[in-house]
Amino acid sequence: TRDLTEHLGISRSHIYHYFKNWQALCVESISTFLENELNEFVMRTASLPARERLKAFIEGVISTTPDPTAMLYGSLWQLAAHNAEYAQLMESILARWHDALVDILTAGAQKGVFRHLNAARFARQLDAMLFGYSDHLYTLPSDAALRQAQEDIDDFIGQNLLV
C-alpha cells in the first residue's frame, strides 16, 4: 500500500477510505480491468460477421505466447482455489465471457451461418476445449502444438456448428 500511495502521491489513509484492505483494492482493480477487457472485445467485434467474431474469440484464448492478461487469468485461477472473493470474481467474469460467446453463436444461427443448436451447451464445450488447449500451450508452447490445436478446434466447429 505504501508503494502504491507514494507512486500516486496520495496518503495511505485516502486509499483506506475507499478500500477496507489491500485485497479489496486488488479485487476491485482486477475486476475493473477484466470488465474493461471484455467490454472492449464486445465493442470491437460487434459489427463483425459471426464467423469473424468467433474467430476473434478463439484467437483471444489460443496462443503460444500468453499475453499479460492471460497470465492474470492464470494467477486468478490459483487464487480462486483458496480465496472466496477471487473465486467469485472468476465465476462472474467467466460467466460474462460465456454470455458473449453465446451471443456470437446465437447471432450466427439467426443469420444462417451457424446451426441452430443449444448455444449455451456448445459454448461450454468450446470453452472447455479452448481452456484445455490454452493450458497446454501455456505450459508447452510450440508452433506445431498451436497448429494442431487450431486444426482440432476448426474441425470441431466445422462438424458441429457450421451450416
Image (cartoon, rainbow, N blue to C red):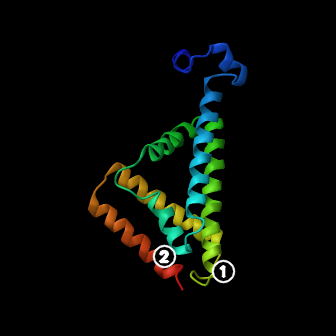
Q: Which label was assigned to residue 146? A: none
Q: Nearer the viewer, residue 92 or 32?
A: 32
Give percent across and percent down for residue 50: 56, 73
Give percent across and percent down for residue 102: 63, 67
| Residue at horizontal 51 percent and vertical 17 percent from the top | 3
Whether 128 is drawn above or below 116: the answer is above
Which of the 4 image quarters holds residue 83? top right
Badges 1 and 2: C-beta atoms under 8 Å apart?
A: no
Which is closer to the viewer, label 1 or label 2? 1
Q: Which residue is mark 1?
A: 110
Q: Which residue is mark 2?
A: 157
Whether 116 is drawn above or below 65: the answer is below
Q: Secondary structure at mark 2?
A: helix
Give percent across and percent down for residue 106: 65, 73
What amino acid is at disc 2? Ile
How many neighbours does mark 1 have within 10 angstroms: few (below 14), some (14-19), or many (20 or more)?
A: few
Work out how far the residue at label 1 is from the one at label 2, CA to CA, in angstroms: 17 Å
